[in-house]
Amino acid sequence: MSTLIVCYSWGGHTRKIAERIAEKIDAPIFDLHEAQPYPAEYKPLADEAWKEIQAGVLRPIEAMPDLTGVTRLLIGSPNWCGTMAPPVATFLSAAKLSGVEAIPFCTHGGGGPAKVEPKMQAICPDAVWKPMLVSKGNEVSDEDLLAWMEAVGLC
């Protein structure tokens, strides 16, 4: 089984979770980068992201990962405005995930999982979805991380 971790991380929290998972399962990480960077300050970023999400804009990304042979895909996103970050929506809209085991993880600053998981599933309904890990920032405990990993069949 070929496993890949794909994540988008503006503030670093989602990337830290991806690194912790990658270390435990020895899988590569592909970082999604937007073609046009978001503002470096939080308030302008939040305003721009909100407008994109409300308009259904798929923000262009620099590159797509090679999914050839990938049978298990972990997908990480921050919760932005109640859903995934637009670059993740762009990736999922372009990815062909029929039959691929999709394992989402999400970080948030207090908004919880919101609609991240159902929105991901709606974009790729032919993937085989596993339950999502939710972490406030990158604060998920090792115990909770391992319990989730066991529950979704990663270890």
Image (cartoon, rainbow, N blue to C red):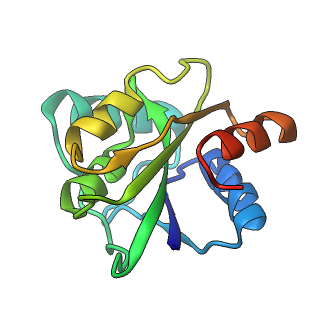
The quarter of the picture where residue 129 lies is top left
Image coords of residue 91 (percent x, y): 29, 58
Q: Please tell me which residue lies in front, 110 or 97.
A: 97
Rendered view: 53 above or below 110: below
Rendered view: 32 above or below 136: below
Image coords of residue 5 (percent x, y): 53, 63
Rendered view: 25 above or below 130: below
In the visual, does 153 lie left or right of 64? right
- Report how many numbered discs are placed on residues in the image: 0
Look at the image and tell me whether residue 144 can be seen: yes
Q: Residue at x 24, y 61 (%)?
A: 60
Image coords of residue 14 (percent x, y): 60, 48
In the visual, does 78 lie left or right of 60? right
The quarter of the picture where residue 51 lies is top left
Q: Residue at x 53, y 50 (%)?
A: 10
Q: Please tell me which residue lies in front, 30 or 23.
A: 23
The quarter of the picture where residue 144 lies is top right
Look at the image and tell me whether residue 139 can be seen: no
Q: Please tell me which residue lies in front, 128 or 33.
A: 128
